[in-house]
Amino acid sequence: STQSTGSSGINAEYGKQKLIKDGLIIKKPQTVHSRARCRKNREARRMGRHTGPGKRKGTANARMPEKVLWMRRMRVLRRLLKKYREDKKIDKHMYHELYVQSKGNIFKNKRVLMEHIHKKKSEAARAKALQEQADARRARSRATQERKAAKTAQKQALYMNIEEVAEES
């Protein structure tokens, strides 16, 4: 077994170049790896095609984890609460109450939370208006009672004066 020397390597290289030049060795064209089919399929999937039960391998939770959905929902609700608090639409007490409720899975989505807030605010406004009406009614009745008491006191004083005058004479 003979080992190749440096010169034979050069000769082999030269032979290769000659074969290429003569057209006996040609470079293969690069194979096409088109993504057109993939793009078309992806567009179809966006429209809801090819996603039926027969195409699914993982569980619903593996495909779209419940935790991710929960995190998204919490972030949306908390962002809304924070915004409402900063805009002074809700006070810090209502904020805390709603924050805890949203953590406790009371609100399904942002719309439900907003409706709840509007309902609570309207209830609070109604209660405040009723309270003011009751206070006004109390104040009026107190004023009438005081007027009546003053009138009776005046009558009594007048009656006492008349009695005193009668006794003197």
Image (cartoon, rainbow, N blue to C red):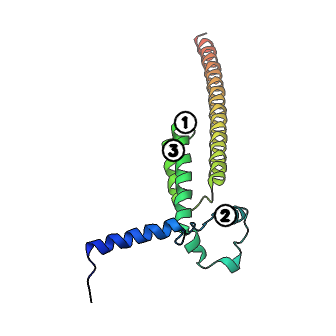
Residue 92 in percent (x, y) is at 48, 43
User: Where's the C terminus, which quadrant?
Assistant: top right
Residue 21 in percent (x, y) is at 50, 65
Q: Nearer the viewer, residue 26 or 115?
A: 26
Toward which corner of the image does residue 62 lie, by quadrant? Answer: bottom right
Question: For the residue marked with disc 1, what is the amino acid?
Answer: Asp
**Is residue 140 visible to us here?**
yes
**Residue 82: image tag:** 3
Q: Please give the residue where the numbered disc 2 appears in the rendered image.
A: 42
Q: Please give the residue where the numbered disc 1 appears in the rendered image.
A: 87
Nearest to the eye among marks 3 and 2: give it: 2
Q: Nearer the viewer, residue 31 or 59?
A: 31
- Ranked by sequence position, the earlier of labels 3 and 2 is 2
How far is the residue under mark 3 from the one under mark 2? Answer: 37 Å
Residue 80 in percent (x, y) is at 56, 46
| Horizontal relation, residue 105 to residue 55: left or right | left
- Ranked by sequence position, the earlier of labels 1 and 3 is 3
How far is the residue under mark 1 from the one under mark 3? Answer: 9 Å
